[in-house]
Amino acid sequence: MRPKKTILCVDDNEQVLSVRCFLLETRGYRVIAAHTPQEALEVLERSIPGSLDLVLCDLLMPQMDGNELVRRAKQLQPGLPAMIVSGTVNAFDRALHADVFLPKGASSPAEMIERIRVLVARKRGPKKVIPVASTQSSDLGTFAHATAS
């Protein structure tokens, strides 16, 4: 069984945060919820690099916006993917540091889950290429020779 991917989910709205966490947990993700950007930064500072697979946060939050949170998160853990979600569609230009920007009302939960799946897979990197053994390549030559005759 594969280990669960861990998502740091940040939103100052308690109701939105709990719904988002529930959605992610029911899809098999391990979720660490943070109610403030400061709380999220503390989680990032305490965590081992590579132990978190994604930061998912709101754009507009008090004290620090999501873009600044993502910028700081990437300073702490440079390979960490980030997704910013916002209720204001025209806020895309403010989400400069995120890998993905998703407007809240303009995308379905299924679309958000798919974007998360892609970001987490991208963090893991491409599949490893397994070199072909020499015995298999000689069998291939025999097969090619047999079909050519």
Image (tube, rainbow, N blue to C red):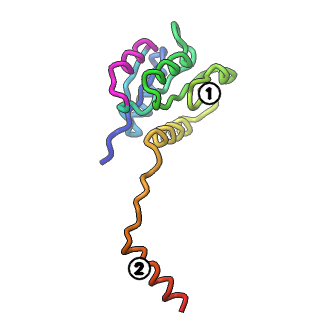
How packed mark 2 is, by other alpha carbons closer than 10 Å (few <14, some 14-19, many 20 or more), is few
Q: Main secondary structure of the magenta part?
A: helix
For this view, does 128 lie left or right of residue 2? right
Q: Amino acid at mark 2?
A: Asp
Q: Secondary structure at mark 1?
A: strand
Image disc number at residue 103: 1
Viewer-side label of 1, 2: 2
Residue 10 colored magenta?
no
- Farthest left residue? 1
Residue segment shown in magenta: 36-49
Q: Amino acid at mark 1?
A: Pro
Name the residue located 51 percent from the left edge and 21 percent from the top edge. Answer: 70
Depth check: 137 or 80 in front? 137
Q: x, y (%) of residue 4?
A: 34, 39
Earlier sequence position, callout 1 versus callout 2: 1
Tag 1 near tag 2, CB within 8 Å: no
